[in-house]
Image: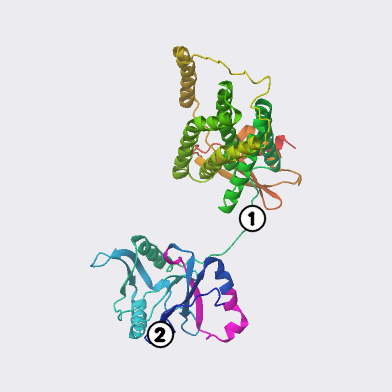
Amino acid sequence: MFNILQLPTYQDQNGQQQLRPGPIVGWSAQKDTAKVNGYLRSPDVQASLPRNIKFAWGVKPMDKSKIFELYALKLAGAENGPVLTGDVINDASSDVDQKGSPEVRMVMNSQGAEKWRAVTAEAAQGKKAIAIVLDDNVYSAPNVQNEIAGGVSSISGNYQIEDTKDLANVLKAGRLPAPARIVGEDVVGPSLGQQSIDDGLMSCILGFIVVLVFMIAYYNRAGTVAVVAVIVNVFFLMGILTSLRAVLTLPGVAGIVLLFALSVDANVLIYERVREELALGKSIRLAVADGFKHALSSILDANISTFLTGLILFIFGSGPIQGFATTLMIGIITSLFCSLLISRLIFEWMIDNGWDIKFSNPWSANTFKNANYAFVKNRSKFYIFSGIFILAGIISMFTQGFNYGVDFEGGRTYTMRFENTNATVEDVRSAVEGDLGRGTQVKTLGKDKISVTTNYLIEDPSTTADAKVQDVLLTALNKKK
């Protein structure tokens, strides 16, 4: 145990190592705390410890590290419990002392004040500590300096304002008679049915294949290099998401698919510049070097602007939006690395080994050569063309409005059990979406129940709205046997 639990020691005047006094018996890395708990629960260790001793970890790591302190708590009374429980606390608040340092002010009732005076008088004789414990975690263990009479106490130390606010909340929470009891439990299935999940996965795979086939068909052997870079990018992205223990959501998958296009987009910019350099008569080595060099500014401009958009979504968004933003930002970094470095290394290796590198097929060699769309010259026409679509969108926003789902508006949830045990989430969704709207969420609930959450008539304040929604739901379900 002492290989993973470091004892608090100091060197005395004679140069000997001594155990440091106080309630902390050691500290350990977060990953080793479970092992320490296992050793402390073993029969041999329990047999050598007093029965009124209990060990508890600090609630926060030491100095923003991953090291946690282990406290030894001396239990009191015949039941081996705390000397005082939270029900004696009338109030606790964050305050500042006369020097302006943060502290916690705690007020007890008359019964607690009397017991608190005796406890602090005993502890003050040896400057002992009293621990504040909630859910078997030590939030603070201040040393008692003097006997405290009257039931009003100040807890001070090396605290920040956030620390005193947290500690005050813990003291107030400890006095609430709110034991937790599990009265029911259900296993909720995914919002998407298995068929939808399979279809979504298949669409991602097909889209990925189409993009890669296009790169090979359009850019010949150079397109193969882009394919390799994109595949490497996928491994990098998945590895980083796994190391961060990120949760894969549907918006996150959408971000991954978007990154395929971003990765290919960078290769397209590079290859078009390489083709321009080759048209000027440069050698393949020089054309590749200049192509990467001249395309860099455009690639960085596009990816940095997209990264900033993802950063804004991450800061101001929540839930699925943050998942999409996280995937997007990580993917931009990995795609830049693969497009600019991995692709370049592959090209250098191919050139050094004398490979014949082609950046086009006969049918694609002159596709956009000498293309001139005269956007600036005909800008008035394009302004009108774009303005029509923008105006149509604005009119639609004010006339049609937005179709908000239950994530924004809330809704009603119905739990149903079907006599037909073969009824699936997809069956129920297809039956009710036409009448209740596409924002309706359908999930499995337990083994034989299905939950339907809908925002249909959510803005109707009448007392008959619940009955209307239920009638519409039952009618829609009875249509499909």
Q: Nearer the viewer, residue 258 or 200?
A: 258
Residue 48 visible? The answer is yes
- Give left or right: position of 139 versus 270: left
Q: Nearer the viewer, residue 245 or 444?
A: 245
Q: Residue at x 69, y 27 (%)?
A: 217
Q: Which mark is residue 186?
A: 1
- Mark 2 vs mark 1: give the one in front: 2
Q: Quadrant of the N terminus?
A: bottom right
- In magenta segment, residue 55: yes
The residue labelled by disc 2 is 15
Q: Nearer the viewer, residue 114 or 218?
A: 218
- Residue 191: % across, % down: 63, 44
- Mark 2 in CB contact with mark 1 (< 8 angstroms): no
Q: Residue at x 52, y 68 (%)?
A: 29
Q: Where does the magenta region start and end? A: 37-63
- Residue 205: % across, % down: 68, 37
Residue 431 visible? The answer is no
Q: Which mark is residue 199?
A: none
- Give left or right: position of 422 versus 193: right
Q: Quadrant of the C terminus?
A: top right
- Residue 213: % across, % down: 69, 30
**Residue type of the residue flagged with mark 2:** Gly
Mark positioned earlier in the residue sequence (2 or 1):
2
- Give left or right: position of 4 versus 231: left
* Label 2 environment density (alpha carbons within 10 Å; few <14, some 14–19, many ≥20): few
